[in-house]
Image: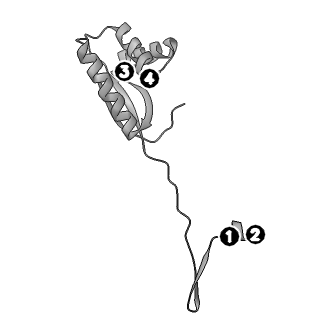
Amino acid sequence: MSEKNQTPFYDHGDTAIQEARPQIKEPPMYQVILLNDDYTPMDFVVELLVQFFFHSTEKATKIMLDIHHSGKGVCGIYTEDVAATKVSLVNEYSQSNQHPLRCEFEPCNQKES
């Protein structure tokens, strides 16, 4: 085994101590959710899903229908800071277009497919 591949050992008297390798952990993920309301047009929701979440029109339409029938739908799964930014942008955009559509995020345990 070459010296390059070995973790360094330090001798402190009669005890050898090996440095621990850092444990890298994936960040927690959050799902961004749109909530259904009775006033926002379906076309606006599809436009929003394409513009802010980069879904195809077909996938955006499917998500919009999920929101319409289930009361809410997942737009995407992101790290916390990205999810918070998307929620803020979507809520501001909806408000500026006089729509009551609400966007939120919550922790999840799955990865985007």
Q: What residue type is labelled 2?
A: Ser
Q: Under tag 3, what secondary structure? A: helix
Q: Which amino acid does label 1 sit on?
A: Gln
Cα distance between the residues tagged 4 and 2: 48 Å
Q: Nearer the viewer, residue 7 or 34?
A: 7
Q: Is mark 1 on a helix, strand or loop?
A: loop
> On the rendered structure, is 4 left or right of 103?
right
Label count reads: 4
Looking at the image, is mark 3 or mark 1 nearer the viewer? 1
In the rendered view, does 6 fall on the left or right side of 72? Answer: right
Mark 1 or mark 4, which has the lower sequence index?
1
Residue 99 rendering spot, x and y as whole percentages: 25, 13
* 3D distance between C-alphas at marks 3 and 2: 59 Å
Number of other residues with Cα within 10 Å of mark 1, as a class: few under 14, some 14 to 19, many 20 or more: few
Residue that numbered label 4 is attached to: 53
Q: Is mark 4 on a helix, strand or loop?
A: helix
**Which numbered mark, 4 or 3, is in the foreground of this view?**
4
* Residue at image mark 3: 70
Q: Name the residue under label 1.
A: 6
Q: Is 67 displayed left or right of 19 in the figure? A: left
Q: Could you say which quadrant of the image residue 93 lies in?
A: top left
Rendered-image quadrant of the C terminus: top right
Sequence-wise first label, 3 or 2: 2
Q: In this view, does 80 lie to the left or right of 95?
A: right
Nearer mark to the viewer, of 3 and 2: 2
Residue 96's tag is: none
| Of pointers 3 and 1, the one earlier in the residue sequence | 1
Amino acid marked by disc 3: Ser
> Residue visible at 38% across and 40% down?
80
Query: Which of the pair 23/75 is nearer the observer?
Result: 23
Quarter of the figure with residue 36: top left
